[in-house]
Image (cartoon, rainbow, N blue to C red):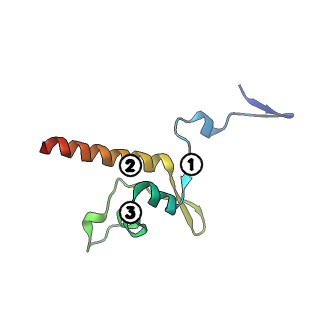
Amino acid sequence: MPERSGDIQREPSMAASNEKSLTLLRRPQVEARTGLSRSAIYSKLHRNPKRPADFDPTFPRPVPIGVKAVGWLAHEIDDWIAAQVRKARESQGRRG
């Protein structure tokens, strides 16, 4: 049922209806959440022939939010972290 605000009838917001909210994180927040440095984040996003192991095609791509500003979707960063934990746990299981 649509929400009522005064005389204006509005549909529920997209974020309220989605399971995962569309929260944007700026780079310092991504650094804090992932434990990666600024250079490590950008190394994961771009191939470098001198350091090919740094590139990670699974790392979330930033979303442009302004002329010189980007943000990352919080749920994509959280999903990437969870995938890293799963990979680490699986490799530990194979060794033991």
Residue lying at the far top of the rendered structure: 1
- The residue labelled by disc 2 is 80
Give the class, few, some or many, for how many residues have Cα within 10 Å of label 1's Cα (few <14, many ≥20).
few
Give the residue at x 45% y 61%. Answer: 31
Quadrant (top left, top right, bottom left, bottom right) of the C terminus? top left
Q: CA distance from mark 2 to mark 1?
A: 15 Å
Q: Position of residue 4 (x, y in %)?
A: 79, 31
Residue 38 vertical position relative to residue 59 in the rendered view, above or below = below
Compared with residue 68, is residue 12 higher up or lower down, i.e. above or below? above
Amino acid, disc 2: Trp
Viewer-nearest residue: 90 or 9: 90
Give the answer, above or below, for where 57 lies relative to 14: below
Give the SS element for disc 3. helix
Residue type for callout 1: Thr
Q: Residue at x 86, y 34 (%)?
A: 6
Are discs 2 and 1 less than 8 Å apart at CB?
no
Work out whether residue 43 or residue 38 is closer to the camera in this orientation and state it. 38
Q: Tag 3: residue type?
A: Leu
Count of all numbered marks drawn on residues in the image: 3
* Label 2: how many Cα within 10 Å (few below 14, some 14–19, many 20+): some
Q: Which residue is mark 3?
A: 45
Mark earlier in primary sequence (2, 1): 1
Mark 2–mark 3 Cα distance, whole angstroms, equals: 13 Å
Q: Nearer the viewer, residue 88 or 59?
A: 88
Label 2 SS: helix
Cβ atoms under marks 2 and 3 closer than 8 Å: no
User: Mark 3 or 1, which is nearer the eye?
Assistant: 1
- Residue 18: percent from the left, percent from the top? 56, 36
